[in-house]
Amino acid sequence: MKKSTFFKSASLALACAAATAAFSGCGSKNYAENNTAFFIGASGPLTGSAASYGIAVQRGAELAVEEINAKNEDGMRFTFEIKDDKASAADVPTNFAALYEKGMQLSLGAVTSGACLSFKGLAAEKNLFTLCPSATADDVTKDADTVFQMCFSDSNQGSVAAQQYFNTDAVPAGTKLGILYCSNDAYSKGIYDTFKAALDTSKFAEVAETSFRNDASGNPPTDMNSQVETLKNCSYFFMPVYYTPAVTFMLAAKGKIASDAVYFGCDGFDGIDTSVKDFDIHTVTQRVSMLSHFFSGSSDEKVQSFVTAYKNKYGSTPIQFAASAYDSVYAMYEAVKTARAEGKEISYTTAADELGRTLSEIFRSETFTFSGVTTAGGTATWSAGGTVNKRAEIVVIKEADA
């Protein structure tokens, strides 16, 4: 994921300088030498506007660690710690240094894409094995041999949305399609670009599109009337945006867009029915759906077991950020077991760079597969470039009113 954060060049320079300062004197010391469990670290927003995402990742990871430790398989134990970055890349170097010097050997990276681009550079420098549950930006795995994604990358989401939904019989031929995206957000624009490249435009009577821009602080506009006016005659909508601007558009569209229309988003829609203050999804008459790698209402046994355990522990239904973090921890656990079965000598005190190289080889091997709550009943594998290959699900958040 996710929530996009934009940074001026000066901010990036400051972040880089902070990273350099944070690691001055670290050298090649093995900070894991006194560990009593495999140490997984992460950086994410635990406060601020994106806190719901960071807290979900924290809870999903902690639940997985708790379950794994209870199994006590081969005496294998994990510990997890996440530090607050408020979805800001500027806080990442300090968080990374603190976790690394505390013994971090594995990581979930940073929760949001902007922050994770900073984290991945540090992880690559230290050969720290990193499996990102929610940082979807394509560049998260670029030039980083030990960085992988459990979530779909932005480019994957766009092409899959076109190929698995809009190009199929699920959307009738002759339909008028409307596209809404944010032109200055890497997440939204990236999905839009790959969606358009994969879309079979010949089946549609019309493809109309409009965009908006976030302000300098990354906040979307509070008025979507002009966008609604442009798309008001469409019956199917592709909206690769986050839930806040999506809700603004839906509310502005009341009485202007057909009540049986279909709104379709990607993972940015996750939480649209629970996380927007003073908004009731049932005030929207149209169908609301999304492309996701997790559906809490799935009948899959693994999913239901996870959902039940999560509800029992936290009193709420998990969103995909929690599910992906849960799977990320379990995938690392399976990789460690695989490495040991192959005769690799790795332990709680194995240095991060050695463990990083070992697990990266496992994840890239043709024989390593993972089945979890975000694999839609199938399995996940990873490409040489670190991206995940797995099935996606189309989740209906709300049906159209009768």
Image (cartoon, rainbow, N blue to C red):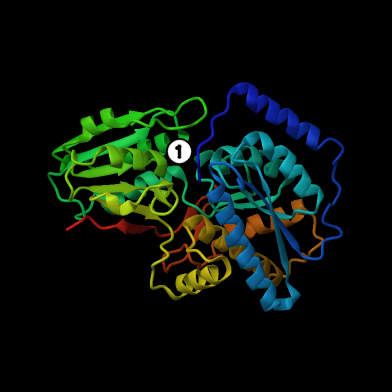
Residue 163: where, in percent of width, then height?
30, 50
Residue nearest the viewer, comparing 101 with 194 = 101
Judged from this view, the residue extending furthest toward the top is: 10
Q: Residue 384: in sight, yes or no?
A: no
Judged from this view, the residue extending furthest toward the front is: 278
Q: Which residue is mark 1?
A: 187
Residue 201: where, in percent of width, then height?
21, 39
Screen quadrant of the C terminus: bottom left
Is 245 located above or below residue 357 in the figure?
A: above
Query: How many residues crowd around disc 1 within 10 Å: few (fewer than 14), some, or many (20 or more)?
Result: many
Q: Residue 25: in sight, yes or no?
A: yes
Residue nearest the viewer, comparing 115 with 397 = 397
Which residue is pictured at 35% across the width and 42% down the height?
Answer: 247
Question: On the picture, is 292 further left or further right than 67?
Answer: left
Residue 91: where, in percent of width, then height?
68, 37
Residue 41: where, in percent of width, then height?
69, 53
Residue nearest the viewer, comparing 172 with 156 = 172
